[in-house]
Image: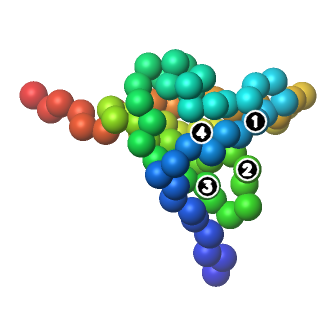
Amino acid sequence: MKTSNRKLLCEWVDFSTDTETYTQEIFEDLIGDEFEAMMFEDTNDIPSYIWTINFVCIIKRSTRMINDISVTKIPRNPACE
């Protein structure tokens, strides 16, 4: 059984794809929210999850012709009515 090696960081670490370098400022502008933490799995140089004040962002790699990412925002505290 393989176990994943996860590292949770509360300080931003810049990461890059073939088309973009993501700094904290660029990511916050993209998401429209403030960074809180990020998680790297195994030896990946791109985080798997990034937490902001209001969202959990799932970072998925896409590697068709170039190395790029997609970001899915999920509300951290959804309002159930």
* SS category of the residue bearing label 4: strand
For badge 1, the amino acid type reads Ser
Instruction: Return the residue at label 2.
Output: 45
Q: CA distance from mark 2 to mark 3?
A: 7 Å
* SS category of the residue bearing label 3: strand
Query: Along the polypeptide, which appears first: circle 1 or circle 2?
Result: 1
Q: Are marks 1 and 2 in contact (CB under 8 Å)?
A: yes
Instruction: Write the residue at 59% across / 39% down.
Output: 59
Res. 40 mark:
3
For badge 4, the amino acid type reads Ile
Between residue 34 and residue 55, name the one nearer to us.
Answer: 34
Among the 4 quarters of the image, the one containing residue 41:
bottom right
Q: CA distance from mark 1 to mark 2?
A: 8 Å
Instruction: Write the residue at 66% across / 76% down.
Output: 2
Give the class, few, some or many, for how many residues have Cα within 10 Å of label 1's Cα (few <14, many ≥20).
some
Q: Are marks 1 and 4 in contact (CB under 8 Å)?
A: no
* SS category of the residue bearing label 1: strand
Instruction: Return the residue at label 4.
Output: 59
Of badges 1 and 4, the one in the foreground is 1
For badge 2, the amino acid type reads Asp
| Residue 5 position within the rendered picture, expressed as x and y whole percent measured from the top left | 62, 69
Between residue 10 and residue 55, name the one nearer to us.
Answer: 10
Task: Check the image and name the residue furthest to the bottom.
Answer: 1
Query: Along the polypeptide, which appears first: circle 1 or circle 3?
Result: 1
Query: Along the polypeptide, which appears first: circle 2 or circle 3?
Result: 3
| Residue 61 position within the rendered picture, expressed as x and y whole percent measured from the top left | 71, 39
Q: Are marks 1 and 3 in contact (CB under 8 Å)?
A: no
Instruction: Return the residue at label 1.
Output: 16
